[in-house]
Amino acid sequence: QAFPGPRVNADDYYVGEVADELFSGMASRLFERVREEKGLAYFVRSSRITGLDSGMFYFFAGAQPGREADVLAEIEAEIARVQSGAVEPAELARCQARLKAGRRQSLQTNGSRAMQAALNAFHGLPINDWKNYDRRIDGVTVAQLAAFAETASSGLARSAGAVSAEADPHLLEDVDLAILPAHFAVAENGACWITDSQMIERVLPFITQHLALVVPRQAIVANMHQAYERI
């Protein structure tokens, strides 16, 4: 389940950062309910993709077969809880503490700091913008999280559907995420083998903003030598 999310320079970028932490991890309410209380999935969490012009905030889970709808209902319920402003101050404080600690850990080496400085420059931010991280994370409020959840799950946001082979390719120009099967994948480099029969519409893998290829576990080969033997 995916929604449009904030771009890297958006006003609510750091609200999205806290929201992602709130919905994720073994200490999250969502994980506790879906896995520990109901046993619906092995894992469940949110994540996000941020770009210069757009972003995506999404949820995913490793669910038991046939329980997908139940997991989705729990995700919807957790989004509704955040929308209602029911996030407790202590819950928010724990998320903020984990994020600040994680950021410090990620910047412990010269290489990681150099990479962050380069990314900041590329994004049009001050090179040492990471020094403002704690202040911005601490500034996120329960009310802002509620507004973020409301915006993300509005009628504008969510879009999902199937694509038929008869569809006009021009109608696919706004596809954010396409999920397609692949014949097999290569463990050593992540390469996937996909043919026209799996693309539904040939333009789809190229026109979509993000592409996910699904491969059965038994269809993963170790290296390219084994892959060439299958082609």
Image: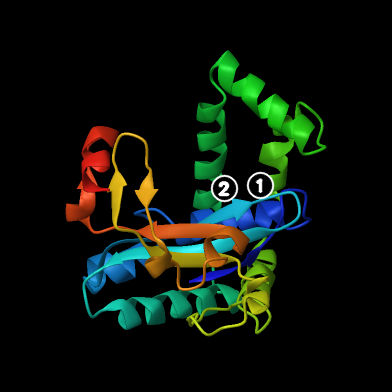
Q: Is residue 90 visible?
A: no
* Residue at x 65% of width, y 81% of height: 154
Secondary element at image label 2: helix
Q: Amino acid at mark 2?
A: Gln
Colour scheme of this structure image?
A: rainbow
Query: Which image quadrant for residue 84?
Result: bottom right
Nearest the eye: 130 or 226: 226
Query: Which image quadrant for residue 119?
Result: top right
Q: Earlier in the sequence, mark 1 or mark 2?
A: 2
Count neighbours of disc 2 (C-alpha within 10 A) and say few if under 14, some if 14 to 19, many if 20 or more: many
Q: Amino acid at mark 1?
A: Ile
Q: Disc 1 marks which residue?
A: 137
* Residue at x 52% of width, y 74% of height: 79
Question: Measured along the vertical axis of the image, is residue 158 above or below residue 184?
Answer: below
Residue reaching furthest left? 218
Please give the count of numbered marks on the rendered protein: 2
Q: Disc 2 marks which residue?
A: 96
Count neighbours of disc 1 (C-alpha within 10 A) and say few if under 14, some if 14 to 19, many if 20 or more: many
